[in-house]
Image: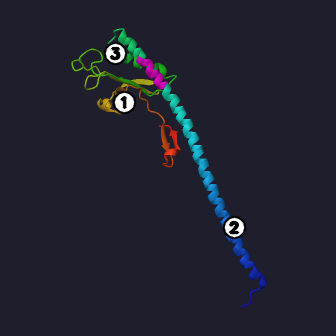
Amino acid sequence: MKVSIKFRVLIPVLVVTSVLLTAIIALAYFTTSAEVEKLAFKQGESLSSQFGAYVDSEMEVAMDSARAFTWSFIGLRRAGIQNREAYAAVLEDGLKGGAARFPFLAIWTVWEPGAFGDDPTKVKNDGLRLADGRFAVLYVNNKGNVRAGKIADDFVKGESYLSPIKEKIEYMTGPMSVSYTGDAKEKTRIAS
């Protein structure tokens, strides 16, 4: 079988061209995929920072409101008012009045046993107490309909209750730092 000279020249040229073209495509793929991945991480970090800042600002509004209630309760205590129903009414009205401006889902308070100067075990259960007698009230906002709720007795064993008592600082949940890749140097904030 006799092969023409054109065919003998064409085959090596096609093979070399295919190998070069495959190498160029592979190089372009790996180069661009790394760039696309970097860009995706940058956009993800930007979005997570944006949402983290939004959650921070929303949580700060809630903390400011909590501080205002604290100061109101301190004023009531200093004035000698120890009526639990008065404190509950302040919370309920605070949730109702703030619902238009601040989209709070709930508002609550839990006090230490005996905070009102009485023996909590000897006070009748008026729906404003936990099993150990401590004053605890919760109001829930369901699309503008504010209703009383029940705080679980084991709430006082949780971190959001115990941390402020132990550390003498405010406790606020908020954005957390996470890493997409598991590398501690690449942590970014996400909304929690």
Question: What amino acid type is highlighted by mark number 3?
Answer: Glu
Question: What amino acid type is highlighted by mark number 1?
Answer: Ser
Quadrant where the N terminus sits is bottom right
Sequence order check: which comes first, mark 1 or mark 2? 2
Residue 159 makes an appearance in the image = yes
Q: Is residue 116 magenta?
A: no
Question: What amino acid type is highlighted by mark number 2?
Answer: Leu
Task: Using a 10 Å C-alpha cutoff, classify the residue at mark 3 as few (fewer than 14 neighbours), some (14 to 19) or many (20 or more).
Answer: few
Label 3 element class: helix
- State the extent of the magenta-drawn residues as a range: 61-70
Q: How many numbered marks appear?
A: 3
Residue 134 position in % (x across, y down):
28, 22
The residue positioned 74% from the left and 82% from the top of the image is 8
* Cα distance in 3D space between marks 3 and 1: 27 Å
Task: Using a 10 Å C-alpha cutoff, classify the residue at mark 2 as few (fewer than 14 neighbours), some (14 to 19) or many (20 or more).
Answer: few
Label 1 element class: helix
